[in-house]
Structures are given as structure tokens and as C-alpha cells.
């Protein structure tokens, strides 16, 4: 896989943070876990349940040598989401995320969680509308 980075951009590879000082292309020739700077969520942006789940999985990807605490937090948060969720689309997505996390395919799990952000937003908007109507 070939990745192009801009000057000053960060990339997270197997727990290491790399910053490049000029425009560069990097070829990853083996199977590694990585995140580009634009895919990294800050803690302050984890404002909804799905964004919090994303942040937890992101921690697992960024620090693969010590995932015990993040894995426990993930299990609790995921179980709580499944317990309260009524949307079939969301439940199917959460099941897929759980399967990816169990097989340590964190990057793919993050992609799947990001795909659920609009679903969550629609649910939250519907709840807000119902609350205003009542």
C-alpha cells in the first residue's frame, strides 16, 4: 500500500507516531495497522455514543502493545450500545464492528463505525424532534 503525506503531516503506524518534514510517499510492504492524521479523532470530538466507540477502537489501534484497558472499555461500551439500540441497521453495524475488533482488524472497524455516524445522527435527530413535539 502506498500512502502520500504532506509536509508536517502525521501518520500512526503500529503505535508509532511519524511526522514527515516534506511531501513524501511511503509504501507499506507488510500488514501494519495505521491511521492518517485526518482519521484521528480527538477526545473532545467524541461527543456521541458512536464517536466514543470510534475513539476507543482508535486507542486500540494506536497502542497495540497495551490494549487491555481499551478492550475492556470497548466491551462495556459496545454492550451498552447493543442493549439500548433499536435500529436494525445500527445493530447489524455494531455486530460487524464487534467481529472486526475481535479479529484485531481495527482500521476496518473504524471505517465501519464511521459509516454508522449518519445513522446515529438520524436517530438522534428523530429523538430531538419527538422530544420537541411532546
Image (cartoon, grey):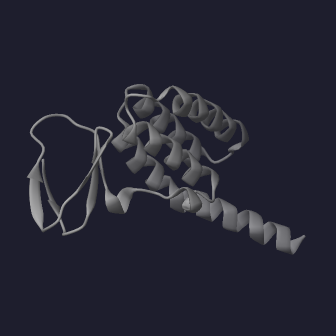
Which residue does the image show at 38% across and 28% down from the upper left? Answer: 65
Image side of residue 64 versus residue 119, left or right? left
Residue lying at the far front of the rendered structure: 21
Where residue 17 sits: x, y (%)?
30, 49
Q: Quadrant of residue 58?
A: top left
Residue drawn 46% across the image and 57% down it: 41
Residue 108, image x, y percentages = 35, 42
Q: Is residue 23 above or below residue 109?
A: below
Horizontal side of 50 relative to 33 (left or right) equals right
For image coordinates 12% across by 44% down, the residue present is 28
Near-viewer residue (55 or 133): 55
Q: Is 57 displayed left or right of 124 in the figure?
A: left
In the rendered structure, the answer to whether residue 68 lies left or right of residue 30 reads right
Task: Give how far across and how far down residue 89 sits, in percent.
Answer: 55, 48
Percent position (x, y) of residue 14?
28, 38
Residue 130: quarter of image: bottom right
Query: Quadrant of the image for the C terminus?
Result: bottom right
User: Observer-nearest residue: 20 or 3?
Assistant: 20
Which residue occupies 40% across, 37% down? Answer: 63
Amino acid at each position: 500500500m502506498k500512502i502520500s503525506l504532506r509536509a508536517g503531516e502525521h501518520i500512526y503506524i503500529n503505535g508509532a507516531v511519524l511526522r514527515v518534514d516534506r511531501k513524501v510517499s511511503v509504501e507499506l510492504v507488510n500488514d501494519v495497522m495505521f491511521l492518517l492524521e485526518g482519521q484521528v479523532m480527538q477526545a473532545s470530538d467524541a461527543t456521541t455514543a458512536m464517536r466514543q466507540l470510534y475513539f476507543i477502537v482508535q486507542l486500540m489501534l494506536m497502542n497495540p502493545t497495551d490494549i487491555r484497558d481499551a478492550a475492556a472499555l470497548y466491551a462495556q461500551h459496545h454492550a451498552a450500545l447493543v442493549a439500548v439500540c433499536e435500529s436494525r441497521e445500527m445493530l447489524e453495524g455494531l455486530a460487524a464492528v464487534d467481529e472486526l475488533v475481535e479479529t484485531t482488524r481495527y482500521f476496518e472497524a473504524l471505517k465501519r463505525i464511521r459509516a454508522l455516524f449518519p445513522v446515529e445522527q438520524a436517530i438522534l435527530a428523530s429523538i430531538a424532534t419527538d422530544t420537541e413535539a411532546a
